[in-house]
Amino acid sequence: MERKKAELVELTKTKEEMDMALANSPLKRQTMLMEEQLQEMREKRSQIVAELQSEQTPEEQRDNFIQKIQKDNKEIGHMQEQLQEINERMAQAQEELQEFQNEFELLAGDKSEKFRELKTRGTQMDNFLDNFDESKRQIEDRISALSKQIVRQLQLISLNCRHGEIVTNVTGLDESLLALGSSAVSADELQDLHVRLQEELITLKQNEALLRSELSSMKTKQTEINENIDKMSNIEEKKKEFRSKSRELQAKRDSLKEELSRLEAENERLKAQIKAEESRFGGGGYEMNRLRELKSRVDQIEKERKQLDEKLTELRTKLDYGPSKQRALELRAEYNELLINVVLGRKSVGVTR
């Protein structure tokens, strides 16, 4: 019992998901309606076969066939209107797809792999839409030909009924009544007519299989179109996210450029200060060695700055200049402290003298 309840819940959930999918996709809903209409046509064909094998008189069969043909013609007209509406919706979707492709081409360019993939799928969709009218026309031609053949067979049945009375049974056309004998129409001719009608039924089955195959192909193409539309719905959000991130990275790059310019100015000032100290203290002493060491560090900083500048040019948004900046500030503080010590030591030497 519990298993049955679980299956019922699962089936209910699946039905709700299918209803939601149909509600969100007009093309799927339209395809479902067309499939239901195809099922109705199969049922009607079965009814026609059953009526051919029933005990009705040929006149009654003829009247029923004529009524069914008229009804089928109305339904065919209704289906043509629905096909026209689908074509209009497909044309609108194609225009929207072309507009999106133009915008995406401006954004990403022809070198984008995803753009080329979407462009290929768009071409496939165009080919499908171009061949859809031809396929529809062929189906309509087959339906028209079958309708004419049915009318012709009904006319033959009516003609044979007027030439004589029922004298024997003919299996497959009317198991109880349909066999006419007269000087104008023989039993062999009626048997040939029965064989032809059987061949027509086989042809109808083949046409039904062909229509089912074409409907399956159309459903596959429609699924691909829906998948492409779902993917395209996220492109606009990605474009907005890309623009926002680009603006943030541009602001960060400008900030890093300003910081780099400031450090370059500070570096030039330190180099000038080192040269001034070298001219003041000559070439010896511990302080001078420290100055040379600091100068070497400043040169190293200059080298690191150039490397960072190259990385900034190459990577731009991925540059992290924080550690080098902190190191430069530490060296500058150490250098300033050493200068203060040198100046204080010089003053103390002067006082001693």
Image (cartoon, helix red, strand yellow):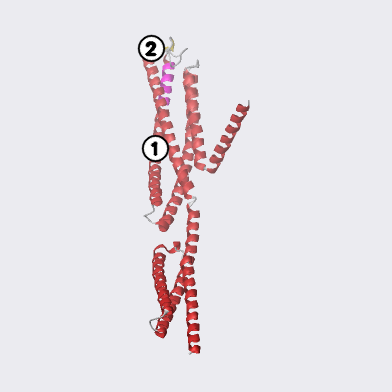
Is residue 43 placed above or below 344 in the rendered structure? above
Task: Compare residues 131 and 98 and report the one nearer the observer.
Answer: 98
Check disc 2 and give the amino acid type. Ala
Residue 21: which numbered mark, if any?
none
Mark 2 secondary-structure assignment: helix
The local crowd at label 1, few if under 14, some if 14 to 19, many if 20 or more residues have their Cα within 10 Å, is: few
Toward which corner of the image does residue 195 lie, by quadrant?
top left
Most extreme residue toward the bottom, as rendered?
353
Q: In percent of the image, x 49 and y 51: which residue is there?
A: 234
Q: Is residue 36 visible?
A: yes
Residue 338 x/y as whole percent:
48, 77
Q: Magenta segment range? A: 150-161
Q: In percent of the image, x 48 and y 66: which residue is there?
A: 322
Read off the residue under disc 1.
Answer: 135
Mark 1 secondary-structure assignment: helix
Q: In percent of the image, x 44 and y 34: which residue is there?
A: 216
Name the quarter where the N terminus is drawn. top right
How many marks the image carries: the answer is 2
The local crowd at label 2, few if under 14, some if 14 to 19, many if 20 or more residues have their Cα within 10 Å, is: some
| Magenta stretch encompasses residue 263 | no
Residue 200 x/y as whole percent:
39, 23
Chief SS of the magenta region: helix
Residue 120 x/y as whole percent:
38, 47
Most extreme residue toward the top, as rendered?
167
Read off the residue under disc 2.
Answer: 187
Task: Compare residues 310 and 153 and report the one nearer the observer.
Answer: 310
Check disc 1 and give the amino acid type. Ser
| Magenta stretch encompasses residue 155 | yes
Frontmost of labels 1 and 2 is 1
